[in-house]
Image (cartoon, helix red, strand yellow):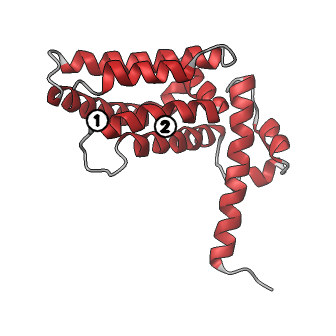
Amino acid sequence: MPRTPEQFEKLREEKRRQIMDAALELFANEGYHSTSISNIAMQAGISKGLMYNYFESKEELVSSIIDSGIEIMEDLFDPNNDGVLTTDEFDFFVNRSFDALAENLSYWKLYFGIMMQPLVFEIVREKYHKIIEGTLGLLVEYYKKQGVEDPESEAFLFGALMDGISMNYILNPDIFPLEKIKKTIIERFGHKD
């Protein structure tokens, strides 16, 4: 029996996800430049030729992986998409960010690895700057409402702190006290009651 367009699209999305998952694991553990399309196809259990039916290039593939993570973070940061960050949304963001970090260590290993490789970072630079500008703007407004003396510096400090915590957790997930740090971040940077 022939497949419906909806069934075909669902199968196509499942195959794309399978390829992205395989590439994510390889990129995170072997590095972007060391991973070939052949390696990705083998890891995904498909032929190299079939791979090009889903992604035109390795660059498109890594960009799609990063995009999917950025979309998740955007949804966590302003879940109701109203352009305003409340204290409850701030707490939610911190909690869910650390949960996402613990749940998908390979993605975050790749994310930070890409940020440290200028040639690879060029692939996602524009998207990265767009998300950073948006989140920084929300944070600055949030800290203004909280009465922080220098909201812009506080927003940058918070972002740098979150990045640093994430990198430390990636390097030492077995010993890093993520839950304790999460509570401390919310207490120090969240509610200023």
Q: CA distance from mark 2 to mark 1?
A: 14 Å
Q: In the image, what residue occupies the spot 77% across and 39% down?
A: 40
Residue 142 locus on image (x, y percent):
22, 31
Residue 162 locus on image (x, y percent):
44, 21
Residue 54 locus on image (x, y percent):
67, 54
Quarter holding the C terminus is top left
Position of 167 with respect to 44 (left or right) is left
Q: Secondary structure at mark 2?
A: helix
Picture quadrant of residue 125: top left
Q: Tell which of 182 and 106 is nearer to you.
A: 182
User: Mark 2: which amino acid?
Assistant: Arg
Position of 153 with respect to 52 (left or right) is left
Q: Which residue is mark 2?
A: 96
> Is residue 115 in sight in this rendering?
no
Q: How many marks?
A: 2
Q: In the image, what residue occupies the spot 17% across and 15% down?
A: 150
| In the image, residue 83 above or below residue 25 | below
Q: Which residue is mark 1?
A: 87
Q: In the image, what residue occupies the spot 75% across and 31% down?
A: 26
Picture quadrant of residue 14: bottom right
- Residue 95 disc label: none
